[in-house]
Each structure stands twice: as C-alpha cells, then as structure tokens.
Image: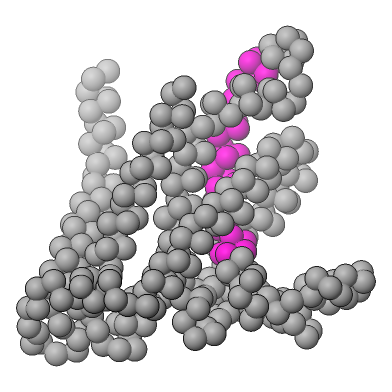
Amino acid sequence: MKKIKLKTELTCFAFYGPIVIIYTMLSIMSTVMLFFYSFTDWNGLTKTFSFIGFENYLKILKDDILIISIKNSFLFLIIYPIVTVLPALILAVLIDNMTSRLGNFVKSGFFLPSILNGLAVSFIWVYMYRSDIGVINTLLRTVGLHSLQVDWLGDLRVVILSITIIAAWKGIGTPMMMFLAALKTVPKDLLDAAEIDGANGIQKFRKVTLPIIWPSFNVCMLLAVTGALKIYEPIYVSTGGGPGYLTYSIVMYIVNLVMGSDRVGYASAIGTVFFTIILFISLLQFRLMSRKGTE
C-alpha cells in the first residue's frame, strides 16, 4: 500500500514538480530584481545605471499622482470584493437549487465573461456606458428615469464604481464556480436534520452551509482583494486614467512610468512598496478570516 502511495506521489511530482519549481524560481528572481532596481536610476533601455540609494523611495512621499493612485486602488479594494464575491455566492446558492438544465445555462452565462479577453470585455462596457446611445442610459430614458442618467465614465462620483463593475462582471465566474463546488460538499443529512429541528432556509444557510463552505469563501475573498489591487484593463480602455490622473490605479501608474517615461528605477520602488502592501493585506486578511472560521 505504501509503495502504491509513493508511486502515485512521485508520478504527481513528475508532472507538477518542474512547473512549480520553475514558477517559484521566476517569482523569486523577479522579486529580487524589482527590489534591486528600486535603488537605481535605470531607464529600462540602456545597460548602464547608477545606484542612488533611497532617493526613489523619498520621491514616493512627494508624488501627488501616486497618492491619487493609492486612493483609487483602495476604493477598488473596498468595492470589488463586495460586487464580486457576495453576488457570486448568491448566484451559486440559486444555481444549486435550480434544475440541472437551467442551472447549467445560468452557470455558463455568468462564467463566460471570465474566459473572454479583458480588453474585449472592457470595450463592450464602454459602449454600454455611453451617455448618448449607451444601453444603460437608453433603458433609464425608456422607463422614465431621466434623473438617474449620468456620464458613467466622466462623472467622478460614479466612475470608480463603473470601472469596478466592469472588472467584477469579468471576475464573478471564478468565485461562483468555487462556491458551487463547495456547496456540493455540504452533507444533505445535516440540512435535513436542521429542517426537522425547525430551521428555515436562512438559518440552515447560516448554521450549516456557511461554516462548511467558509474555507472557499476565505479563498475567494483573498483572490478578490489581490485582484482589486491589480485592476488595469478596465481603466486603460474606459478612461485611460483620466480625466487627468483622477482614475489612475497603482498598477496603471507603474505601467505608465515604465512604458511612457522610462523611469524603471522609480517604478520598481513603487512596485516594491505595492508588493509589500499586497502581502501585508493578504496575510492580515487570511489571519482574520481563518480566526473567524474557527469560532
């Protein structure tokens, strides 16, 4: 029995081991290089550069555009998990209670955007958001809600929410599928026992289903938080970071520094700080939600 188990483990390692090792090495190398170049004035084009110490990090404290980018990124961090994970959980519960044919149809419809190209998805929403002939404002005019019409990508009061919805529409499929898989692990006899004890649907979900699927909820929230901080394509297509720099995210600012200004050293410094922020938030979230799951 032990020989069979060992053979199975060796077979799995033969398939997955090299990929994991290569991915880990590349991740470590890129992180080390990011940290190294953050202390230089390298422009990304020439072979020569100079070490300038902590000068790049000191510039961060005085960068007004970066402050705007950080503020927007944290708004994404707050909104994106709410409009992605919670709707995905609700959808998963509804689909789990549908007939097989209807459930597969709804599941396919919501999962499809997650496999589409991010730029294509963003272009679709840009046309839907148009204030003159866009689908959303046209529907509002049709039902007589003229006062609710806004310039979805030009009004600073709603533009961050509009961009987040684009990202959420593409990202909702993965957590939905994870929740569906988790719901299949809930023992039916526990639900039946709770129903016999007089629990209604909400009580069964809170007391039986949610504790069992909590690890999946934890993973989905972790992915949503890191995904929120890396939103780029919807901003690039819909507003380009404008008006001015008012819809910049940290990722978009870093990309523009590298591609547009050739300031790779400074971009590396921001990237190092950004990496530290993501790592800290992820560890804090994992710790808090793990503690919640054990209560």
Q: Quadrant of the N terminus?
A: top left
Colour pattern: one colour
Magenta residues, start to end: 164-191
Q: Nearer the viewer, residue 170 or 2?
A: 170
- Is residue 222 depicted above or below 150 in this figure? above
Residue 35 picture quarter: bottom left
| 197 relative to 20 in the view: left or right | right
| 102 relative to 121 in the view: left or right | right
Report if residue 173 is visible in the image.
no
| 106 relative to 83 in the view: left or right | right
Report if residue 110 is visible in the image.
yes
Q: Main secondary structure of the magenta part?
A: helix
Across and down, in percent, residue 177 comes to 58, 45
Across and down, in percent, residue 191 comes to 67, 19
- Is residue 172 depicted above or below 269 in this figure? above
- Is residue 237 depicted above or below 183 in this figure? below
Residue 249 picture quarter: bottom left
In the current view of this chain or complex, which residue is farthest to the front? 62
| 218 relative to 6 in the view: left or right | right
Residue 62 picture quarter: bottom left
Across and down, in percent, residue 160 comes to 58, 69
Q: Would residue 170 be counted in the magenta stretch?
A: yes
**Which residue sits at x=24%, y=84%?**
263
Q: Would residue 185 be counted in the magenta stretch?
A: yes
Q: How many marks?
A: 0
**Which residue sits at x=39%, y=78%?**
65
Q: Nearer the viewer, residue 99 or 137?
A: 137
Q: Nearer the viewer, residue 187 or 230?
A: 230
**Which residue sits at x=46%, y=22%?**
295
Across and down, in percent, residue 218 comes to 47, 39
**Which residue sits at x=24%, y=76%?**
59
